[in-house]
Amino acid sequence: MKNAVQRFGKFLSAMVMPNIGAFIAWGFITALFIEAGWLPNERLAALNGPMLNYLLPVLVAYQGGKLVGGDRGAVMGGIAVIGVIVGAPDYPMLMGAMLMGPIGGWVIKKFDKAMEGHMPAGFEMLINNFSIGILGMILAIIGSYLIGPLMAAILVVLSSGVDVLVNHGLLPLAAIFIEPAKVLFLNNAINHGIFTPIATLQAQEFGKSIMYMLEPNPGPGLGVLLAYWAFSKDKVTKSSAPGAIIIHFLGGIHEIYFPYILMNPVVIIAPIVGNVCAIFFYSITGAGLVGPASPGSIIAFLSMSPKGMGMVITVLGVVIATVVSFLVASPIIKMSGEKSLEEAQAKKDSMKAESKGVAAAPLTGADVKAADIKKIIFACDAGMGSSAMGATKFRNRIKSLNLGIVVTNTSVDNVPSDANVVVCQTILQDRAAKSAPQARLVTLNNFLADPSLDELYAELEALSKGAAPAAETPAAEAPAEEPKQEAKKGVLIKEGIKTGLASVDKDTAIRAAGKLLCELGFVNEDYIEAMVEREKLVTTYMGMGVAIPHGTSNAKETVKKSGIVVMQYPDGVDFGDEKANLIIGIAGVGDEHLEILANIAGSLEDEELLENLKKNADVDTIMKTFG
């Protein structure tokens, strides 16, 4: 049940997150230009309605359709939601968009599956286009007559329920559901699907709404992070808290504190109580925001405050939530034990993957038992970067089990037929299944630290304890040798190591690594774009602050000779929700670069060394360690 809620919550969140920029634009237009805004402007305020009533629902439905049915599903979602909008013209149909988008994607996906093998040659384009047009029209009609009025009725009921809570002073109790919902990834669905439509109706009447303040208040999470910073017994957790505070409070990424809750679930009491107190304060002071604060940054929270005392009241509510959350969390943290932050982060990543409908923990694919496993293949797009490091790390991990299992890596499209287990990123699982239908799939988020690998290791460990010593492995199947201490000359040179670089965006960092590979004569300029394209297919972030961008499998001809460059960014480069401090650009012709990758993977076992390499190490230290 819990996993189902997580999947549902993350799916709804996935419809909203790519469109947060549009929500921010609408929020600023609302805060600045409406009659009660900071810079009232009747003409610009007229942008508010069309953006809320049309742009945002269409974007959300488009993304929802795309998640289910790809590009064709996206178009279906966009068509279908127009019917819902027309069917309930007096209400923002964000909740309707979250329903109709996935339905549109599902319908066209089912149609396409039914047509497989039955489409007449030469009629593909006609059928593909007319199917979207006809099915989209039907869904739009259904939305107009059925879904739109239904969603409007639901909003009326919810609005009435909110009025009852407000009138009886019970609104603060909403925090009991809001804070746990965040950890289950339901926050965006609740905030934008329910609170925002209700708040918008209230804001149209009163100029502001407290409903905008219930979920994005950064105070409850800030209190938890401050308590961990002050009282955590774990050195890693304590040292990580300041950075998490900045990301949470200023960046508005509340997800950063979820692992701290998962380390000690009882701590969830702290943000609940903190938010209860803040909402109570906002209720008795008549507070409200003029537009949605998204993301939940203090900057966004304050920018949506009304003029005058409104901003002061908003700040006081954040302070109250922070102080109360801190005071409640502190004794819990001091008195109870903790899991490691890395373990909690892995659990959060597992929850995210599961909620996308793909496995982070389960082993899927063919029914291959542990006793039958003779060869494990780590597969990535090109087979020369992330999979190589992942294979090296896992091979070293299971070496002491003495099971005689071969662990190696390859391109996801070239998995050998004798592979028993294929380990790949979730986005590549369909290609892996097609390439190795006989193998069991282990899907994960990154190759270095993932619950899926922990489960596979635990299964093999249990086998080793109950099994006789493994028979000698045939020479052709012998496990790869331990990496030599000295890499092949010329693959990594001092000129290819840059330290102390200022943080940049991911695209710029990848291009910088590609440019250095080019300048050193390892590749030609076309390889740089191939590296950027590779990142769009699936992230090259490995975990533990390391990313290894490289070209696509189709870019082999642009590589002149194998080479590696190392770019050190002490303050990190954003790779989605994570930061990479070491960006290791790779160009591989054969296997020359694998020795260095093996050394890199080995260095990740030493936590103190890794931190030094990511933040402080000079060129000579990096060269000595990786070479």
Image: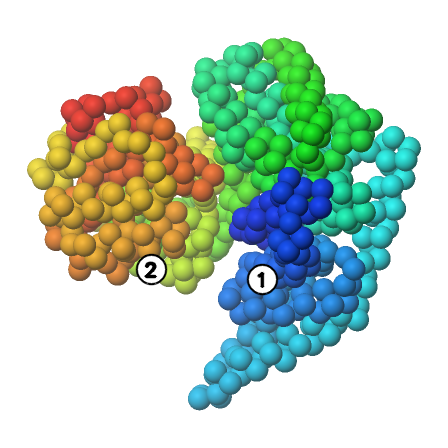
Residue type beneath disc 2: Asp
Question: Residue 516 is drawn in which quadrant?
Answer: top left
Q: Secondary structure at mark 1?
A: helix
Using residue 417 as the reference point, say whether residue 54 is left or right of it.
Answer: right
Using residue 116 as the reference point, say whether residue 378 is left or right of it.
Answer: left
Camera-side mark, 1 or 2: 1
Residue at image coords 61%, 59%: 55
Which of 284 and 579 lies nearest the eye of the viewer? 284
- The correct choice, above or below, for 323 with respect to 106 in the image is above
Provide residue 219's location: percent of width, then percent of height.
Answer: 64, 25
Residue type beneath disc 1: Tyr
Q: Quadrant of the C terminus?
A: top left
Question: Residue 149 is drawn in which quadrant?
Answer: bottom right
Which of 63 and 19 lies nearest the eye of the viewer? 19
Identify the image's colour scheme: rainbow, by chain, secondary structure or one colour.
rainbow
Number of numbered labels in the structure image: 2
Alpha carbon of mark 1 to alpha carbon of mark 2: how far?
Answer: 30 Å
Provide residue 403's location: percent of width, then percent of height.
Answer: 35, 37
Residue at image coords 90%, 35%: 167
Which numbered tag is attached to residue 413? Answer: 2
Q: Quadrant of the N terminus?
A: top right
Neighbours of disc 1 within 10 Å: few (<14), some (14-19), many (20+): many
Which of 123 and 521 lies nearest the eye of the viewer? 521
Q: Secondary structure at mark 2?
A: helix
Which numbered tag is attached to residue 254? Answer: none
The residue where tag 1 is placed is 62
Q: Residue furthest left?
A: 489
> Which of pointers 1 and 2 lies earlier in the amino acid sequence?
1
